[in-house]
Image (spheres, helix red, strand yellow):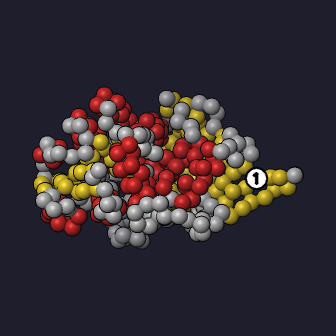
Amino acid sequence: MTIKIGIIGCGGIANGKHLPALSKLSDVSLVAFCDLIPERAEKACHEYGAPGATWGTDYKELLKQDLDVVHVLTENAQHAPLTIAALEAGKDVMCEKPMAKTYAQAQAMLEAAERTGQLLTIGYQNRFRKDSLYLHEICEEGALGDIYFAKAHAIRRRAVPTWGVFLNQEAQGGGPLIDIGTHALDLTLWMMANYEPDYVVGKTYRELGDNPHAANAWGPWDPAKFTVEDSAFGYVVMKNGASIFLESSWALNTLDVREAKTTLAGSKGGADMNHGLTINGEDHQMLWQKDVDLTIGGVDFFDGAGDDPALTEARQWIDAVKSRKQPIVQPAQALVVTQILEGIYQSSSTRKPVFF
């Protein structure tokens, strides 16, 4: 069975992650491409399209085609309307992270998936790293006990994305919190198996954005177009009393840099993804820690490299489509991520805690 896929949005995330991964799967056919910039759609079609593949600028025309799956790879503001339209057209949907710009939009996406019976997943590929999969397995086994405190890390020292619409509040809904903080929070909630937030307190900052000559991995930015935060922090309390500290930045004067990582503290042990993966605990009144070696013993179950998170994500998604089983990243989980992120933004603007 070959799964026919249409791509809406042929920009950076499409070419950097989805298209290279999907092109390595033998049971996938990329048959339609859409982008508001026609040159991007045409280029993607020529590079990755199956024989007879089409390209255009109108997503409504793409949705009329005989497709099994649609990948929505656009700016955040378009995630909800495009995903809902695709679900209602009878397509399963892979939508890039974050699920949506707002919690209300994400709710509408989940409701559309439930109403239509179509599958929906969100592009949180960091779940599919070797360290993430290993840590999730030991968390499920209860090796750490009850995880009551965690840190979600998404800190860059100076790596502000200066292309596309990343700096545009209207198009994206925010800066590093919604862009990379979303990955760290998704990982942390998944490890904790806890999706019931009680309240959140948060603060966003824009302290470095006015400097047009600032050192930056991707070159200088235009302060007039930098309409989002450059760092954001939140403290989340869950209904069972567990708590999470979430830190995110594109530009922050710190040397403690780590992205899409989590630190977990449980009643039996802990885990830290800072430098590799380290598990800690105690035994016979002695403390111990173990650095986990994830470089040996791997088996390639998938087309291509087994340690490629993007490829593993694509493989399990297509398998879910074929088997009609829920994918690993479930929309109800991604909904809670968006709920918490929105709560941090709201708390910062109102200077009050946000209760869910």
Relative to residue 41, is residue 215 drawn left or right? right
Residue 308 falls in image quadrant: bottom left
Q: Position of residue 95 (x, y in %)?
A: 33, 47
Residue at the disc numbered 1? 281
- The residue nearer to you, when weighing 46 against 168, is 46
Q: Position of residue 65 (x, y in %)?
A: 15, 46
Residue 148 falls in image quadrant: top right
- How crowded is the residue under tag 1: few (<14 C-alpha within 10 Å), some, or many (20+)? some
Which amino acid lies under the numbered mark 1 shown in the image of this protein?
A: Gly
Picture residue at 20% right of the left edge, 37% below the top: 89
**Farthest-out residue, front:** 1
Secondary structure beneath label 1: strand
Picture residue at 60% right of the left edge, 69% below the top: 296
Residue 205, relative to residue 340: is it above or below? below
- The residue nearer to you, when weighing 233 against 348, is 233
Picture residue at 39% right of the left edge, 49% below the top: 319
